[in-house]
Each structure stands twice: as structure tokens, then as C-alpha cells.
Image (spheres, rainbow, N blue to C red):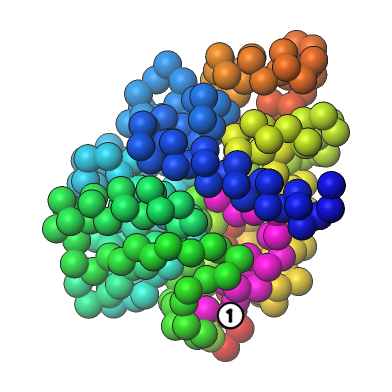
């Protein structure tokens, strides 16, 4: 299979998986797999990732699908009047939180590649009365956003899903204003995954197989032109989100993984929060 065919296969799988989530709810795998809540409620899961109960109480119902791996709006203080762009905005959770911080004089734009997610987010915005939030259908590798037009970029557990991460960060650099900043929560690896896991579509949609090793990931950010790349926090991914998930067990059996291999993979996956700046 050519690289282009593989990219197309991954894109289609991600679109189908997240379209299903938008329609039915659940986590970032079609069968409630590794990136989302298991036996815990979505609210409890999101609280573990850094969202306060006060924040979660203020967003429209249905905006939190339990898809994240951190709270990027907590990485730095958003200011009144700023223009914020969310890469892979899903049902709008981080967009709505950001909108409350930038105020009516500011603006938040969410980009998602799945029409069902965009439709759900727009419905949530309408129900919540958000006038300063807009959702656009588009790919994070080809942003439907003007050059030098954004103050802050957010993203939460999405860039790992792209097979063209360098292109994502080059696009992010393009649309940021000089002096703008990027605040990211994402899944990275402390060491390389077994080949059979990397080649699994189910594990890819579940935010594991598409993840890069941490240093390689941060190097891609720097190569795109970003300065002051600063790791804010690095935490193990919630173990119960990996080991306690029935779908993870199903995937591991299908891949012929031993219990020891599953434990090693779980210990390899971490949630990375970092900031980076575009030079003036």
C-alpha cells in the first residue's frame, strides 16, 4: 500500500469513527476504546483531565463527549478580545470554554473534519446562546483560515490522529498572528510501539497507534518554525482508560498481545501539555 493510500485509509477510518461518536456518543473509538471514559461518567473522566466542575457546568449539554487527554484552555490565560482557533473541535467543549474567557469582543473558531461533529457543535452553540463561536468543516492539514489571523491555537487529543503532523503545525504557524501562541494537549509515546499495534486501524482511531514519540513530536513543532516550545505537564494517560476498557481487551486479543505487552503499551502512553510561540 502506498503512503497516499494509507493516509486515505486512516482519514476515512477516523471520519467514520468520529461520525459514529457524534451520532451516538461515546469515546474516541467506535467501540468505546482507549481515549474515552470507561465505567466512569464523562464528567468524572473530564475532571481527571483537568477540567473543573465549574467549567463543565457552564457548557451546553452534549458538548463534552469525553474525547480529550487534557484541558488546553488551562495551559495559559486567554485574554478578552482574542481570536482563538481549536483544531479538531469535536462537539465544542474547548471552544465554549475559550469563548467565556475571550468574551463577546473576542471570537472562537472550531475546525473539524467530520460533518456530523460540526453539525452537533453548531447545535450546541445555538442551544447555549454562543454568538462568538463559529464551527467550520475542514482538515487541520489544510485549515480554512486566513494567514496571520489568529491569536491563540488550541487542540486536545487530535493532532496525534493526523498522519501528516508536520503539515498540521506548518498550517498552525501560517494562521497565527506574529507573536501568537499555541496551547496543546496531546497523546505522545515514551518509546516506539510494537509494529502490529502501529498498523492497527482500531488502535489508530483510539489515539494510540498514530501517536509520535515525545521528542520526535516536539521536533516537528520546532521544524514548523515555532519558538519557546515549553512542556507544561507530562502525565501518564489514565490507566483505567487503557487497561480497564473492554474494547482494548478485544483489540489486544485480535492483535495477539500478551498481558505484559498491554501493560508496557499503557505505560508508554502519556498526555503531553505544551505551549509554543510564533515569532514577532
Asked if residue 13 is positioned above or below residue 81 in the image, the reply reads above
Asked if residue 101 is positioned above or below residue 181 in the image, the reply reads above
Q: Residue at the spot x=74%, y=27% of the render?
A: 265
> Hey, which quadrant is residue 254 in on the image?
top right
Mark 1 crowdedness (10 Å alpha carbons): few <14, some 14-19, many ≥20: many
> Hey, which quadrant is residue 141 in on the image?
bottom right
Looking at the picture, tell me which residue is in the foreground, 17 or 258.
17
Q: Secondary structure at mark 1?
A: helix
Q: Tell me where residue 261 appears, x and y as whole percent.
A: 79, 19
In this picture, which residue range is highlighted in magenta? Answer: 158-176
Please identify the dominant SS of the magenta region.
helix
Q: Residue at the spot x=77%, y=20% of the render?
A: 255
Q: Residue at the spot x=78%, y=36% of the render?
A: 199
Say whether residue 89 is visible: yes
Say whether residue 276 is visible: no
Residue indicated by mark 1: 174
Looking at the picture, tell me which residue is in the foreground, 20 or 37.
20
Asked if residue 40 is positioned above or below residue 66 in the image, the reply reads above
Seen in the image, is 233 located left or right of residue 80? right
Looking at the picture, tell me which residue is in the foreground, 37 or 142.
142
Seen in the image, is 129 located left or right of residue 77? left
Q: Tell me where residue 107 appears, x and y as whole percent.
A: 30, 72
Residue 76 falls inside the magenta stretch: no
Quadrant into which the C terminus falls: bottom right
> Which residue lies most toward the bottom here?
280
Amino acid at each position: 500500500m502506498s503512503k497516499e493510500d494509507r493516509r486515505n485509509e486512516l482519514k476515512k477510518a477516523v471520519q467514520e469513527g468520529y461520525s459514529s461518536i457524534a451520532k451516538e456518543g461515546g469515546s474516541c473509538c467506535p467501540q468505546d476504546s482507549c481515549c474515552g471514559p470507561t465505567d466512569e461518567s464523562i464528567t468524572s473522566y473530564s475532571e481527571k483531565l483537568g477540567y473543573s466542575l465549574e467549567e463543565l457546568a457552564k457548557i451546553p449539554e452534549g458538548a463534552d463527549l469525553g474525547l480529550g487527554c487534557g484541558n488546553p484552555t488551562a495551559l495559559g490565560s486567554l485574554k478578552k478580545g482574542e481570536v482563538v482557533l481549536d483544531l479538531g473541535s469535536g462537539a465544542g467543549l474547548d471552544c465554549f470554554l475559550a469563548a467565556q474567557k475571550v468574551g463577546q469582543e473576542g471570537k472562537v473558531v472550531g475546525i473539524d473534519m467530520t460533518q456530523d461533529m460540526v453539525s452537533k457543535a453548531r447545535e450546541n452553540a445555538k442551544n447555549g446562546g454562543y454568538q462568538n463561536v463559529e464551527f467550520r468543516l475542514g482538515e487541520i492539514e489544510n485549515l480554512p483560515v486566513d494567514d496571520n489571523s489568529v491569536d491563540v491555537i488550541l487542540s486536545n487529543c487530535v493532532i496525534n490522529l493526523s498522519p501528516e503532523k508536520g503539515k498540521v503545525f506548518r498550517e498552525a504557524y501560517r494562521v497565527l498572528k506574529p507573536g501568537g501562541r499555541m496551547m496543546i494537549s496531546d497523546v505522545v509515546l515514551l518509546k516506539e510501539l510494537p509494529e502490529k499495534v502501529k498498523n492497527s486501524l482500531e488502535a489508530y482511531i483510539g489515539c494510540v497507534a498514530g501517536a509520535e514519540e515525545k521528542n520526535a513530536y516536539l521536533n516537528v513543532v520546532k521544524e514548523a518554525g515555532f519558538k519557546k516550545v515549553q512542556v507544561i505537564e507530562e502525565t501518564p494517560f489514565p490507566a483505567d482508560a487503557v487497561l480497564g476498557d473492554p474494547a482494548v481487551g478485544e483489540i489486544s486479543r485480535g492483535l495477539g498481545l500478551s498481558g505484559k505487552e498491554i501493560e508496557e503499551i499503557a505505560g508508554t502512553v502519556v498526555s503531553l501539555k505544551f505551549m509554543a510561540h510564533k515569532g514577532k
